[in-house]
Image: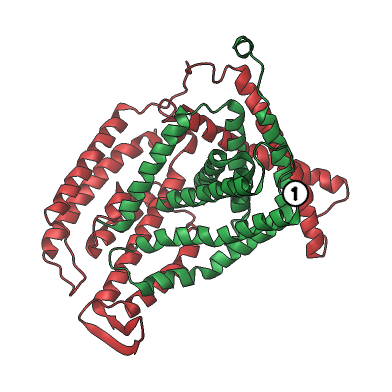
Amino acid sequence: MHGALVFLWENPLLLIGQIFFLLLWARQLKLLDPFPAILRYGWWISIAFLLVNPLMGQNGVTFLWKGPIIPVIGRMDLTLEELGYAVMAMLRLICLLLLSVMYQRGVDHDRFMLLFTKVAPKFVLTSLLAIRMVPFLSKELQRIQEINQLRGLRPAAQSIRAKLIYQMNVFRPLLLSAMEGSWQTAEALYARGFGSGPRSIYKQEHMNAQERVSLFLLLLFFTFIVAARVNGFGDFAFYPRVTWSDPLGDGLFLLILSVLWTLSAYGLTRRSEH
Amino acid sequence: MNAALILVVALLIVFVVLFFLFEKSKIDEKAIAIIATLGALAAVGRILFAALPNVKPTTFLVMASGYVFGMRAGFFVGVLAAFFSNFYLGQGPWTLWQMIAWGLSGVFAALLRRMMEKNDSDQPMLAGRKKRWIFIGSCTVWGFFYGWIMNLWHFLAYGTYMTWGGFLAVYAASFSFDLAHALGNFAFASLFATITVKTLQRYHRKLRVSRWTPKEESS
């Protein structure tokens, strides 16, 4: 829900409120400790956007700086509105990154996949096989490296060429081993009657009543928020001039949103506490 | 409504349709196991090289899979690689774009094979310097294509008032990352293309050998 809401508004107050709520929620669930490395790379592109987009944009009327006119591109200038819009874009990105980290650290991937066993059995089977392959491949890699070491092949060789040759000596057996492993898996699937008819047994993850109610409420709240947006709540325009028609009303709207978000979050996090 | 959100919804619909087709297809257990294995291998490759920005064997492995096993396998290996590596590296709206970008690289490699290799031929693939260099070149170019597809998402996510300057800024800022990706692909493909494709082709041949069943004999 939060991921979709990020794109529903451009109001900095609502975005800051959303970030604040997500931070508190993530902190309560201990999802931000240690601080995620994911924030490392996106910043360069974001900062470039923050600097260049306002400079080359032709929107806004409150000029902070007027520069030269460049053929094709137009006038280089900086307006308050463009700067505000770029900051809003950064807030939006922070929100998305926070959500990503929370999802990554808060969701049990195996259990998540098992929710879909009935509707998409082939995809779930493929996915679970792939998940199972990860520890298998890491063990195989360790085994191959140990064998190489016993045979006198070492990665500590000085030249880059020697190191690359060593990597080839690791990669090929790993690929062969992985493929052979997949073949054995396929044989095991065949021996268990895969593909001979519809599956009779599914290991399914069931949602409990409280989670169902919470998800229903989430959907209800989302519909309410969309309806509120359509009726003008949270309206904020950057262009041609920064216009915020009802700061007080939006403050109250944020308060209501916080209550709704807290209610749905409370219902969905109860299971992990038991 | 935001253009990025519309595109994400459109991509979600495309994926739902593709997954529905995948569920309804008569794919056998061997193909499923191979797709899962190659997807996991490509995902692990991405995680192992996470410290080096954009230098990853994933694109090369997805393209090699598509080249040998065809369009469907290539696409799903790319989809799985993005999906599973992001369990470790971070899921987000960008996952869908990575899935489509890597999926398309697999599809492209499958099309490349159709153009370069004879159909149903048991001849070794990528035999000859020309074919090998075309494959290596394609892997290198896809380093840029992948980055450009991802940049599009990054750019659209900023909102409605996008300028050509902003567009250029996003693409210019990512150039070094895209170049690193392309050079990485070049290195991986130059070193491993022949042996990878040879190994995968061996299993592709095994895949094409069907099991004998009494039903087939009677028909």
Q: Residue sitting at 59 percent across and 17 percent down?
A: A192
Q: Position of residue B186 (x, y in %)?
A: 66, 60
How many C-alpha atoms fall within 10 Å of the one at disc 1: few (<14), some, or many (≥20)? few
Number of numbered callouts drawn: 1
Query: Can residue A31 be seen?
Result: no
Q: Position of residue B136 (x, y in %)?
A: 66, 57
Along the viewing direction, whichever of B200 and A118 lies nearer the viewer: B200
Q: Residue sitting at 64 percent across and 42 percent down?
A: B68
Q: Position of residue A249 (x, y in %)?
A: 11, 59
Q: Provide the letter of the chain coloured red.
A: A
Q: Residue sitting at 21 percent across and 82 percent down?
A: A62
Q: Identify the residue under disc 1.
A: B127
Which image quarter holds the C terminus of chain B? top right
Along the viewing direction, whichever of A33 and B174 lies nearer the viewer: B174
- Looking at the rendered structure, the secondary structure element under dot 1 is loop
Left or right, residue A128 beside residue B34: left
Q: Residue furthest right?
A: A152
Is the residue A19 above or below the residue A48 in the image?
above
Q: Provide the letter of the chain coloured green.
A: B
Which image quarter holds the N terminus of chain B? bottom left
Q: Position of residue B199 (x, y in %)?
A: 73, 41
Along the viewing direction, whichever of A113 and A72 lies nearer the viewer: A72
Left or right, residue A84 beside residue B139: left
Please, which chain is the residue tagged with disc 1 on?
Answer: B
Query: Which amino acid type is marked by label 1?
Result: Ala
